[in-house]
């Protein structure tokens, strides 16, 4: 009768042999081929700068901006001026500057910001 320790010794030897056979050889990383490097693609969709309304131009100080950057600047303004409702942080209190952007609303939800800004992006053909 074989002992459990004898059984383990045999399986350890088999596992060690299997690991060494399956171990991949280590190669040095290949030098990047300049011909195969990807060219940067121009921004598109919401990342592309587009002409904006005069009200939004006054707010951001640029004639063209991407939707993403516009939302970032609005959020930076909200946080700088502490316009979030302290009880419900999802609600934004609008000061005079934001009322011009957000159709004169006193308060907006944070999910409404992108939707309300979309009317300020001029449609181009």
Image (cartoon, helix red, strand yellow):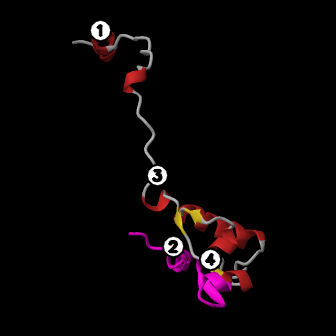
User: Could you say which quadrant of the image residue 60 lies in?
Assistant: bottom right
Residue 99 horizontal/vertical position (percent):
66, 86
Q: Label 3 belongs to which residue?
A: 43
Provide the residue designation for mark 1: 17
Q: Nearer the viewer, residue 45 or 7?
A: 45
- Quick check: marks 4 and 3 in contact, CB under 8 Å? no
Q: Earlier in the sequence, mark 4 or mark 2?
A: 4
Point out which mark residue 121 bears: 2
Q: Earlier in the sequence, mark 1 or mark 4?
A: 1
Horizontal and vertical percent for residue 56?
A: 62, 74
Magenta-tinted stretch? 99-125
Q: Are marks 1 and 3 in contact (CB under 8 Å)?
A: no
Graded by Cα atoms within 10 Å as few (under 14), some (14 to 19) or many (20 or more), the crowding at tag 1 reads few
- When asked about the image quadrant of residue 75, the answer is bottom right
Q: Are marks 2 and 1 in contact (CB under 8 Å)?
A: no
Circle 4 residue: 54
For discs 4 and 3, the disc positioned in front in the rendered view: 4
Q: Nearer the viewer, mark 1 or mark 4?
A: 4
Q: Report the Cα–Cα distance between label 1 and label 4.
A: 74 Å
Crowd tier of the residue under label 2, counting other residues whose Cα lies within 10 Å: few below 14, some 14–19, many 20 or above? some
């Amino acid at each position: 009768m074989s002992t459990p320790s004898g059984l383990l010794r045999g399986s350890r030897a088999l596992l060690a042999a299997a690991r060494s056979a399956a171990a991949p050889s280590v190669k040095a990383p290949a030098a990047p081929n300049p011909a195969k490097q990807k060219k940067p693609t121009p921004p598109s969709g919401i990342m592309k700068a587009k002409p904006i309304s005069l009200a939004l131009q006054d707010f951001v100080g640029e004639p063209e901006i991407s939707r993403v950057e516009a939302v970032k600047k609005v959020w930076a303004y909200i946080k700088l001026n502490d316009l979030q409702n302290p009880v419900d942080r999802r609600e934004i209190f609008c000061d005079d500057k934001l009322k011009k952007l957000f159709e004169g609303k006193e308060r907006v939800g944070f999910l409404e910001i992108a939707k309300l800004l979309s009317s300020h992006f001029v449609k181009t053909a």
